[in-house]
Amino acid sequence: MQQFLNTIAPYLLPAQVICLILATILILMQNRGSGLSSSFGGSNEIYLTRRGIEKWVVNFTVILLVLFVILRVLSLYI
């Protein structure tokens, strides 16, 4: 097991960086409303469900962030 962990150790940091960059891009793609004005009552739209590409983006963002946490914890033990 230790040999396997030593083998993947050089790839953990680049994998973490890639996960964070992709997650940041996906989070920025999740546009709700029209900025800060919708936070203060500027919009009467109600979002109940996510469909299509929006659902895929949210799910992939969660998967990337969970993967980042797993990689980060793994890198702490190596």
Image: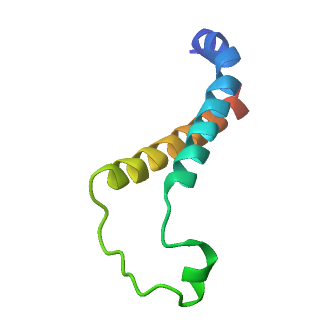
12 or 73: which is nearer to us? 12
Q: Where the C terminus falls, by quadrant?
A: top right
Q: Is residue 11 visible?
A: yes
Image x and y of residue 39, in percent: 58, 82
Image x and y of residue 28, in percent: 57, 53
Image x and y of residue 27, in percent: 55, 53
Q: Residue at x 69, y 30 (%)?
A: 75
Give the left or right position of residue 66, taking residue 69 as reference: left
- The count of marks equals 0
Give the left or right position of residue 12, taking residue 64 as reference: right
Q: Residue at x 58, y 36 (%)?
A: 19
Q: Residue at x 59, y 43 (%)?
A: 69
Image x and y of residue 13, in percent: 70, 26
Q: Residue at x 31, y 75 (%)?
A: 48
Q: Is residue 51 above or below residue 36?
A: above
The quarter holding residue 25 reads: top right
